[in-house]
């Protein structure tokens, strides 16, 4: 994305228009972290029918999601292959119109994957793909196991104006050539409402729409007291978390700002659907059993799976 050619994001037929004229001077494009390129892979045949991209932190969760969505859509899942295995970085699976791919932890790992998937789907001429993040997070004043759909994302730097009213910085701060660029980080309202409606039919857990803080660290960056360093008191921690609650933040994870900012810059609809592993007002450590956490991680899959199957049925 370069300033000099800032035309609209998508083409009329719904395919993704890359806003970077330098790409046209490449002989071919290597999607290095995916282990794919435009010369040796027929991306249009491989990915032209993709309608949904589901991303999440771990390889295991995204393989599980591929199997889950195959069952939901009644599509075969035998011979499920990791399409990006040559890169040894990420794992990507495809079931019918759904890509399921992991992005690792945090903004840098997620944005590399996201940007290469955006280029890949543009070359593939995929039409109007919708992006979901099915993630995990810490919750604020909501029970562990709740689902949070992010309406906007904060980077954790809370700015105050002169009259001391809080101005939250709902943006992704991206350093480019020595200058920090601020990109707005809001999610698609209608998509969120549709997801929330589908989630509300589920009785086993509660789902909230709310703000999300995306931190660049798991420990002090999320006001935890259990890291190797801690340069503040428990009272400081509680006061910061309560300040977040006061401005509408429901959960803390590590990707939402960039996910909102880059998808909307590319003209793509996107939603961040995360399950809370704990209530941060009650502690810092994730103490639930592995089986409990596995059960929790299925919840965003259920919500997003319902959305996808609904769309798939109407096709
Ligand atoms: N995550 C957090 N904080 C939590 C729980 C989960 O950041 O308290 C998310 C974001 C990141 C990964 O990808 O999970 C870190 O464990």
Image (cartoon, rainbow, N blue to C red):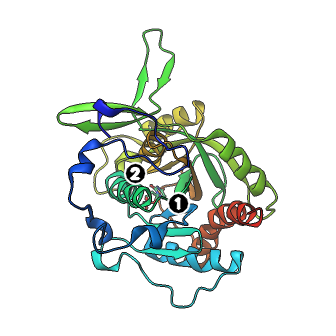
Residue depicted at x 53% and y 60%? 135
**From the viewer's perspective, is residue 298 above or below residue 214?**
below
Q: Nearer the viewer, residue 124 or 101?
A: 124
Q: Nearer the viewer, residue 225 or 164?
A: 164
User: Residue 114 in the image: x percent, y percent?
Assistant: 40, 56
- Residue density around tag 1, few if under 14, some if 14–19, many if 20 or more, within 10 Å: many
Numbered disc 2: secondary structure: loop
Quadrant of image for the N terminus? top left
- Residue under label 2, please give it: 225
**From the viewer's perspective, is residue 23 above or below residue 167?**
below
- In the rendered structure, the answer to whether residue 105 lies left or right of residue 297 reads left
Q: CA distance from mark 1 to mark 2?
A: 20 Å
Residue depicted at x 69% and y 41%? 190
Residue depicted at x 52% and y 46%? 268
- Residue under label 1, please give it: 136
User: Residue 3 in the image: x percent, y percent?
Assistant: 30, 31
User: Residue 198 in the image: x percent, y percent?
Assistant: 77, 56
């Amino acid at each position: 994305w370069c300033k000099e050619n800032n035309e609209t994001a998508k083409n009329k037929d719904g395919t993704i228009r890359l806003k970077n004229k330098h790409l046209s001077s490449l002989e071919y494009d290597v999607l290095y972290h995916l282990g794919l390129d435009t010369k040796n892979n027929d991306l249009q045949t491989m990915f032209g029918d993709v309608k949904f991209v589901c991303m999440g932190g771990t390889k295991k969760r995204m393989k599980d999601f591929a199997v889950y969505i195959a069952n939901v859509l009644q599509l075969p899942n035998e011979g499920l292959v990791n399409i990006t295995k040559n890169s040894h970085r990420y794992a990507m699976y495809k079931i019918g119109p759904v890509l399921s791919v992991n992005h690792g932890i945090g903004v840098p790992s997620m944005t590399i994957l996201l940007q290469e998937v955006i280029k890949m789907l543009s070359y593939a001429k995929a039409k109007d793909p919708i992006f979901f993040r099915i993630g995990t997070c810490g919750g604020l004043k909501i029970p562990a196991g709740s689902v949070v759909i992010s309406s906007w994302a904060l980077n954790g730097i809370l700015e105050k104006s002169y009259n001391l009213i809080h101005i939250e910085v709902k943006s992704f701060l991206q350093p480019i050539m020595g200058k920090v660029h601020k990109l707005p980080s809001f999610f698609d309202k209608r998509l969120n409402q549709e997801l929330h409606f589908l989630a509300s039919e589920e009785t086993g857990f509660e789902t909230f729409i709310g703000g999300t803080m995306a931190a660049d660290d798991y420990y002090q960056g999320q006001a935890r007291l259990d890291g190797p360093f801690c340069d503040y008191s428990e009272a400081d921690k509680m006061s910061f978390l309560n300040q977040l609650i006061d401005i509408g933040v429901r959960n803390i994870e590590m990707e939402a700002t960039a996910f909102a900012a880059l998808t909307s810059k590319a003209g793509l609809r996107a939603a961040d659907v995360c399950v809370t592993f704990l209530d941060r007002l009650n502690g810092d450590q994730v103490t639930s059993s592995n089986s409990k956490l596995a059960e929790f991680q299925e919840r965003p899959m259920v919500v997003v799976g319902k959305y996808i199957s609904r769309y798939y049925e109407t096709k």
